[in-house]
Amino acid sequence: MDKVRVIEVKQSVFADNNAEADRVRRQLKADKTFLLNLMSSPGAGKTTTLVRTISDLKNDLRIGIMEADIDSTVDAETIAAAGAKSIQIHTGGMCHLDAGMTEQGLREIGAENFDLVVLENVGNLVCPAEFDTGASKNVAILSVPEGHDKPLKYPLMFEICHALIINKIDVLPYFDFDMEKVVEYAHMRNPELAIFPVSAKTGEGFEAWENWLRQQTAEWNGE
């Protein structure tokens, strides 16, 4: 009896996506638009972090936001109320965005009209890390209530990111969260990872995070 034939398709899927992601980055570079891919688990505070960041930077940078969700327009409406142009991307049940979806969103929002576009990816620490969206930089948010061991459990997310925001530090006294350990574990995965402890509620720590974002945007856009 012949063995069952196995066809490996995952590699070709990733290869095609990576090629498209490179095309997206080349176009962003030509348009002088910095694309930030923002990822986290649900409830870590992506949208709240964006609202405060928009409030602080909207007079300095032209900012557009692409909200990715399986359904609803709640986050896009929240961002629009904060004063930034936003569009909602529905993924049709998929738990991540790939480069093709991102490119469609960039066309819809008119990326060439912005200095900074933020893709708020689907809330998930696994799938979004596997697909290159074509972003200029990747950033993850980890919130204090999630625990300090997440870099050990979800290594790829921390390996592919350029910065880590540790959100909700205002509730540190109420959780068994070790800041030294999370920094140690994150740097085990990625020694070059920039780490910013913040509170999106109070604004603590946002100056350092926003200075990093300004610098990255300016360097990408050739300023």
Image: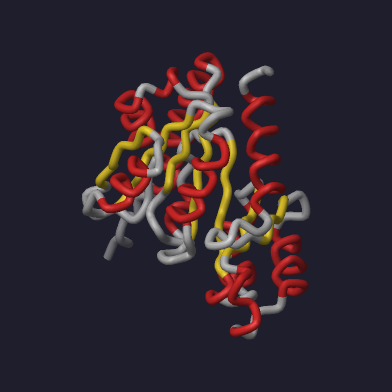
Image coordinates of residue 155 in percent, x first then y, are 60, 63
Of residues 78 and 43, the one nearer the viewer is 78
Of residues 160 and 113, the one nearer the viewer is 113
Image coordinates of residue 20 in percent, x first then y, are 43, 29
Quadrant in which the C terminus appears = top right
Looking at the image, can residue 12 be seen? yes
Q: How is the image coloured?
A: secondary structure
Q: Is residue 61 left or right of residue 102?
A: right
* 183 relative to 90, above or below: below
* 150 relative to 161, above or below: below
Residue at horizontal 66 percent and vertical 25 percent from the top? 218
Splitting the image into 4 quarters, where does residue 197 fall? Answer: bottom right
Report how many numbered discs are placed on residues in the image: 0
Quadrant in which the N terminus appears = bottom left
Q: Is residue 52 left or right of residue 111?
A: right
**Residue lying farthest top?**
30
Image coordinates of residue 179 in percent, x first then y, are 72, 72
Splitting the image into 4 quarters, where does residue 53 fall? Answer: top right
Q: Is residue 78 left or right of residue 127?
A: left
Residue at horizontal 53 percent and vertical 75 percent from the top? 146
Image coordinates of residue 13 in percent, x first then y, are 39, 41
Of residues 84 and 163, the one nearer the viewer is 84
Looking at the image, can residue 13 be seen? no
Residue at horizontal 43 percent and vertical 56 percent from the top? 127
